[in-house]
Amino acid sequence: MIIRADLHIHGRYSMATSKNMTPELLSSQGSLKGLHLVATGDAFHQGWLSMIEEATEEVNDGIFSVREDKKLHNEFLQEELPEGFSKNPETKLILTSEVEDSKRVHHLIIIPSLDAAYQMRKKLKGSLDSDGRPRVRMSGAEIQELALENGCIMGPSHAFTPWTSIYKEYDSIHDCYDETPDFVELGLSADTEMADRIEELQDLPFLTNSDAHSPWPHRLGREFNEINLKNLSFSALAQALHDKTITANYGFDPRLGKYHHTACTKCYQLYHPDEAIKMNMKCPCGGTIKKGVDYRVEELATWDEPHHPSHRPPYIHIMPLAEIISLTYSKGVTTKFVQKIWQELVLKFGDEISVLIDAPMEELIELDPELSRRIRAFRDKTLQIKVGGGGRYGELVFNDDSSEQNSPDSTLDSFL
């Protein structure tokens, strides 16, 4: 069976996370998005664990479903969905947590059971309930050893981001872990074309996840994985990662990332890394120049061009539908105007991912000619991007409307 899975999110107890993040709403929103499996996130936090236990029941090996008496009205919808509306089965949940080690490197752990989560709580060295994502006084290797003892799946989170990634601290993943990790999560700032220039990653499966801190449809599932599983269970997911049966990675174009290119953090002037180094990483405006993720990949790269191993699936650049609507009409992504159009399209085609990927273009044109042009640009790869850097997100430029290049409405800073 082929499933769509977002395996990295955060619950309501994590810093800067929406209080609307509940197991019930994650499942409800996941279904409208078109996801079959969504992470719980933060499964070492007692408050969040209690919410999971109260709201869900285990329906298969490591897979949880919202209890019938806990299913609720989705407060993010402007109108009630028609009774019985559902293109996909109910979105199921799987236990996960991100952990920060003593060097501020983040690790994603997928957990087989509630018992395993409680066993690990006893041995993780740190304050587990002060934040949903615990900071522990342990190395990456120590966390990995504990995770493996408890039957977990583990790998580095957002491997290339400047502040809390494995490659900001180490030149090799093997300098962090004693055992080869089960996967590498690419993060919003990298894609397969970048990561497959690094030889040590050739045998590892890549994950693309949202790292969502909110249940809004432009957050949850903004990156996701398409995976071929024998059945929907933790053990089948573990086997799929071992056998490398991910069939597609869906995610942002990394050029939209706010640290993709080397740039000044004050005026956002882009620099070639060699020029920045000669300038001692100081911009004439007085700001600090921040090394971009693209240059960090250049430092780590074995080859000038990507070498895709036979098991590597395609990486497909997408963008949340609500953000495309927002850019099309220059309206805020959470406004009633944008959400109304989003819901109408979801009702028409079954879920958001179907609108972005599968909906017939002639039907989209008939419904909304302006919006359909933007969706076509993503599908046809005719989208142009003004690269992000220095802490400012990249900008979208559609080749049929070059005037958008300098429009403030075309930048992700307005809603990311």
Image (cartoon, grey):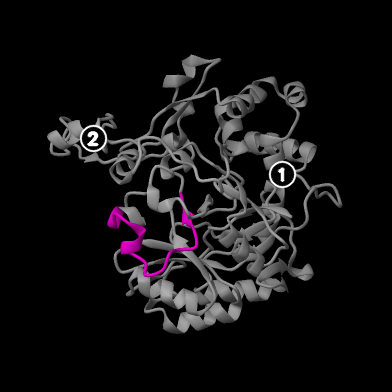
- Measured as percent of width and height from the top left, residue 69 is found at 78, 70
Secondary structure beneath disc 1? loop
Q: Which residue is mark 2?
A: 273
Amino acid at the residue labelled 2: Pro
Q: Is residue 413 left or right of residue 81?
A: left
Front residue of this view, candidates 78 and 183: 183
Circle 2 packing at 10 Å, graded few (<14), some (14-19), many (20+), is many
Q: Nearer the viewer, residue 268 or 207?
A: 207
Question: What is the crowding at mark 1: few (fewer than 14 residues within 10 Å), some, or many (at least 20)?
Answer: few
Write down the residue under mark 1: 78
Give residue 343's quadrant in the image: top right
Q: Secondary structure at mark 2?
A: helix
Q: Residue at x 45, y 84 (%)?
A: 122
Residue 146 shown in magenta: no
In the picture as drawn, the residue positioned furthest to the right comes out as: 83
In the shown orientation, is residue 236 left or right of residue 396? right
Under mark 1, the amino acid is: Gln
Q: Which residues are the magenta region?
A: 168-186
Q: Nearer the viewer, mark 1 or mark 2?
A: 2
Q: Is residue 46 above or below residue 373?
A: below
Residue ID at (31%, 46%): 300
